[in-house]
Image (cartoon, grey):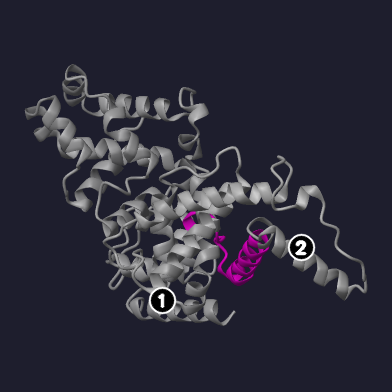
């Protein structure tokens, strides 16, 4: 409770300091907004004009106005990065809008994660040792019979050891992918004990997700999607939150993937919810917003699958510098139930932001440009994405 209370006290103090010049009438109006109501206008008074002040104010409320928080976050949290972990947890639905419930919610989420790890990630020998200890504690002094199903050399489908070795193969693939995850960033590299712990935590998250979702399993690229989440929560300025970054990252990773997990299912590629349908939506979105550019790319036969497949499946994590990715995700997460739509807005905006280069280029030049997207002004990119006329 102390960590959450200290955060609320800090935010409330900052908010009060910023609001010294606000009128009593304005304060009354802000307090009387019912839960869930959309504020019809933004209130700006002395001290509330910058994004940081807006964030401090919104997060200091007992009941967060989610629409107001979304409006601030969609600009990108470049002036309140230390508040990003909390903002993301709220936007993803990991924490409710009622700040009085946060402590209990975090405790429940983290306890559940510990239980899931014990259930899904423990080796058969660890499970057997635990069962033997429980039997001894209950006074059951009987020998443990090792059946063929429990034998390490058993290859039967129902064998616990056979499944364990299959999981080990998945873990090896995850390890290989994690070694290639932002190797230029010390946080993720394998050259220090801290980074090794980070990789171990991410490995646990990805393996647990694969075990709990056998129809999907682990798909290469999930490591790239997890990286920004884990980085944000592991670098939280709150020490207690940092210690539980693995559990919080898993919970938010599951919530995040629920919005576009169909893109990771090859069986759904040609369905109405698969990646090909999503790429087609991007093409139609570009056509609706800039027919000239759409026709040019069509004439050159530059189809979205040539460049946007990676954009969409990896949530743009390979197209921008790492810290820029988090700013873009601030925008994406402001509509977690429609993250696919937000993502398509950004993808369309990326095309519009390099329109002049694309209109001048041929097939080879344009494909190279889109597969190695240039640095652009993020504020302008998000402004364009926000103003996209959606279908």
Position in image of residue 357 (x %, y %) = 9, 34
State whether residue 8 appears in this view.
Answer: yes
Closest to the camera, between mark 2 and mark 1, is 2
At a point 70% along the width and 53% down the height, the residue shown is 152
Reading the image, the residue beneath label 2 is 128
Position in image of residue 273 (x %, y %) = 49, 28
Position in image of residue 224 (x %, y %) = 38, 51
**Cβ atoms under marks 2 and 1 closer than 8 Å:** no
Confirm whether the magenta stretch covers residue 362: no
Residue 347: quarter of image: top left
Residue 94 lies, with reference to residue 294, above or below; the image says below
Magenta stretch bounds: 90-117
Circle 1 Cα neighbour tier, 10 Å, few/some/many (<14 / 14–19 / ≥20): few
Horizontal side of residue 185 vs 197, given as left or right: left
Look at the magenta stretch and give its main secondary structure.
Answer: helix
Residue 262 lies, with reference to residue 60, above or below; the image says above
């Amino acid at each position: 409770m102390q960590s959450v209370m200290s955060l609320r006290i800090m935010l409330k103090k900052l908010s009060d300091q910023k609001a010294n010049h606000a009128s009593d009438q304005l304060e009354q109006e802000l307090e009387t907004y019912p839960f869930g109501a959309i504020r019809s206008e933004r209130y700006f008074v002395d001290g509330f004009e910058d994004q940081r002040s807006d964030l401090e104010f919104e997060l200091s409320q007992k009941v967060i106005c989610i629409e107001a928080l979304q409006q601030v976050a969609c600009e990108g949290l470049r002036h309140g990065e230390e508040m990003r972990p909390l903002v993301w947890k709220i936007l993803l639905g990991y924490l409710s809008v009622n700040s009085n419930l946060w402590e209990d919610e975090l405790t429940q989420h983290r306890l559940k994660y510990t239980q899931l790890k014990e259930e899904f990630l423990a080796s058969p020998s660890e499970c057997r040792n635990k069962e033997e200890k429980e039997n001894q504690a209950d006074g059951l002094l009987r020998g443990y019979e090792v059946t063929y199903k429990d034998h390490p050399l058993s290859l039967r489908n129902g064998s616990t050891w056979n499944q364990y070795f299959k999981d080990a193969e998945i873990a090896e693939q995850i390890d290989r992918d994690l070694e290639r995850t932002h190797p230029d960033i010390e946080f993720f590299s394998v050259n220090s004990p801290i980074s090794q712990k980070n990789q171990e935590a991410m490995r646990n998250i990805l393996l647990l997700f694969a075990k709990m979702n056998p129809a999907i399993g682990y798909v290469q690229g999930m490591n790239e999607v997890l990286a920004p989440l884990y980085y944000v929560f592991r670098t939280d300025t709150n020490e207690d939150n940092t210690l539980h970054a693995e559990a919080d990252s898993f919970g938010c990773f599951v919530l995040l993937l629920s919005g576009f997990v169909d893109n990771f299912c090859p069986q759904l590629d040609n369905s109405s919810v698969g990646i090909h349908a999503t790429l087609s939506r991007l093409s139609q979105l570009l056509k609706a917003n800039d027919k000239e550019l759409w026709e040019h790319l069509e004439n050159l036969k530059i189809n979205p699958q040539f460049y946007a497949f990676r954009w969409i499946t990896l949530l743009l994590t390979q197209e921008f510098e790492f810290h820029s990715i988090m700013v873009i995700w601030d925008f994406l997460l402001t509509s977690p139930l429609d993250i696919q739509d937000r993502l398509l807005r950004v993808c369309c905006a990326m095309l519009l932001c390099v329109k002049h280069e694309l209109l001048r280029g041929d097939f080879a030049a344009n494909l190279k440009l889109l597969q190695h997207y240039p640095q652009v002004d993020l504020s302008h990119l998000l402004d364009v994405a926000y103003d996209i006329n959606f279908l």
